């Protein structure tokens, strides 16, 4: 920010203020994390100046000898992490990675069977407000009302009835292990492609803390900025050479122009970090923290969707306490705790309010927090929600939040 100040003091001030916000708030948005300084610096480097349409060794522009090395490093490292044969590291975002996958084998009007957004899926999994919902004939599967987990038998039945060309798995708000092997079996039985979007759990998969979709799926996409802890962006993996060619053609020139070489450099740095021994421990701690936080909230009387969590996030149903997600997230903002309102499977609350909140632990775990701090955070959340009408109590909690965060500085 000090260097930015020479060019634009106003932007520099805003960056400084955001850094302070990140330092002093407890970040519990499940899709956020704190990338390392090395990742941030690579992303802020001179590589932003370079056009490199095409792929390493096959570019439309001259002067690509250095960026070719960067992109190849990123590809080799991500293949090593996930044990996949082919990778495309150019997608600007998770949504663009997903678009390239759909476009590579589907035609408009083709049938896709995808997880319902209201049960934890993502907009790009066929929601009507997204291109994926407009271009394709979408049928959703979801969780069972009984245990709020994916009902694989019902999914198998649905697949037989729908006969989709592609089944999409992966979620933005599903707290349980996903059985990719089982979904692959279902996809195979109806001759459908299996596309796994592992954006949320990629870090857990990289560390072996969640079963990998790589041996089972035809296409695997991810964002790089969530549990994986890299820069904002996307990747696509596959083990099938013919599909890898289709994917490459759909990323560029299909849905994108020049790749963001500065972001690809930052992805390469993140992938090297993910290959270090401490990374597995970090990912294991994310899950331990998530389980500790869910257990304490449950102990304090909150209903945790599906009764707990196997991964980095949980959904807290606030309806039994006469609350909704909007009120809760706004209250927690006043106490310096950042979460997002979220729908609950079979929600009875308006979509704009949400029956609950989604809480995730990748960011607080990056700060070095462990189970004791999770207990403390659960207490803060409870006290804030109980005292939501009392600004002075919320201010005291905010001061306690700041004091806790001072013991765990940003990386
Ligand atoms: N896929 C899943 C499962 C996600 O949760 C998200 C983002 O929240 C995306 C894709 C989209 O990623 P992006 O915001 O980079 O487009």
Image (cartoon, helix red, strand yellow):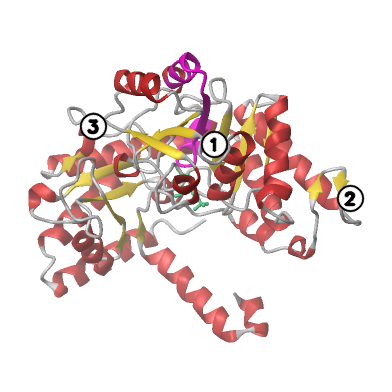
Task: Give the residue number, with chain letter if any, for mark 1.
Answer: 278
Residue 44 at x, y percent in the picture: 67, 64
Instruction: Mark 3 or mark 2: name the one nearer the start of the chain.
Output: 2
Task: Give the residue number, with chain letter if any, for mark 2.
Answer: 65
- Of helix, strand and loop, which one carries label 2? helix
Please tell me how crowded label 2 is: few (under 14), some (14-19), or many (20+) other residues with Cα within 10 Å.
Answer: few
Q: Return the mark for residue 408.
A: none
Residue 198 at x, y percent in the picture: 49, 36
- Image side of residue 95 versus residue 358, left or right: right
**The quadrant where residue 154 appears:** top left
Residue at the extreme front: 109
Give the residues drawn in magenta, as a range.
Answer: 183-205
Residue 115 at x, y percent in the picture: 37, 36
The residue lying at 57 percent from left, 39 percent from top is 102
Residue 319 at x, y percent in the picture: 12, 49
Instruction: Between residue 401 and residue 334, name the one nearer to us.
Output: 334
Instruction: Mark 1 or mark 3: name the one nearer the start of the chain.
Output: 3
Gap between marks 3 and 2 measured at Cα: 51 Å
Gap between marks 2 and 1 measured at Cα: 32 Å
Gap between marks 1 and 3 measured at Cα: 33 Å
């Amino acid at each position: 920010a000090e260097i930015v100040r020479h060019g634009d003091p106003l932007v520099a001030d805003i960056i400084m203020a955001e850094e302070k916000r990140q330092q002093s708030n407890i970040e519990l948005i499940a899709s956020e994390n704190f990338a390392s300084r090395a990742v941030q610096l690579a992303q802020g480097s001179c590589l932003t100046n370079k056009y490199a349409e095409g792929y390493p060794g096959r570019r439309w522009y001259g002067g690509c000898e250095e960026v070719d090395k960067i992109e190849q490093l990123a590809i080799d490292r991500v293949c090593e992490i996930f044990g996949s044969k082919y990778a495309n590291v150019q997608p600007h975002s998770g949504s663009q990675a997903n678009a390239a996958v759909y476009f590579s084998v589907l035609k408009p009007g083709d049938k896709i069977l995808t997880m319902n957004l209201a049960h934890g899926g993502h907009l790009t999994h066929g929601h009507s407000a997204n291109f994926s919902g407009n271009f394709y004939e979408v049928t959703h599967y979801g969780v069972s009302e009984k245990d709020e987990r994916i009902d694989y038998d019902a999914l198998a039945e649905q697949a037989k009835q729908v006969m989709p060309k592609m089944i999409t798995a992966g979620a933005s708000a599903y707290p349980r292990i996903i059985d990719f092997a089982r979904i692959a079996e279902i996809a195979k039985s109806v001759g459908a492609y299996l596309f796994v979007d592992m954006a949320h759990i990629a870090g857990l998969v990289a560390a072996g803390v969640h079963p990998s979709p790589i041996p089972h799926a035809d296409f695997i996409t991810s964002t790089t900025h969530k549990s994986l802890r890299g820069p904002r962006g996307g990747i696509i993996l596959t083990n099938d050479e013919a599909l890898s060619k289709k994917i490459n053609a759909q990323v560029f020139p299909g849905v994108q122009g020049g790749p963001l070489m500065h972001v690809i450099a930052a992805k390469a740095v993140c992938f090297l970090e993910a290959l270090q021994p401490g990374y597995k421990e970090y990912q294991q701690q994310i899950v331990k923290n998530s389980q500790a936080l869910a257990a304490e909230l449950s102990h304090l009387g909150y209903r945790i969707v599906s009764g707990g969590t196997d991964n980095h996030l949980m959904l807290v149903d606030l309806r039994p306490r006469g609350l909704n997600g909007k009120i809760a997230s706004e209250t927690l903002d006043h106490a310096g705790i950042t979460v997002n309102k979220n729908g609950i499977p079979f929600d009875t609350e308006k979509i704009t309010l949400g029956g609950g909140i989604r809480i995730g632990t990748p960011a607080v775990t990056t700060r070095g927090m462990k189970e004791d701090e999770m207990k403390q955070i659960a207490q803060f959340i409870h006290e804030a929600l109980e005292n939501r009408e009392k600004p002075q109590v919320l201010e005291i909690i905010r001061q306690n939040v700041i004091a806790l965060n001072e013991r765990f500085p940003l990386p």
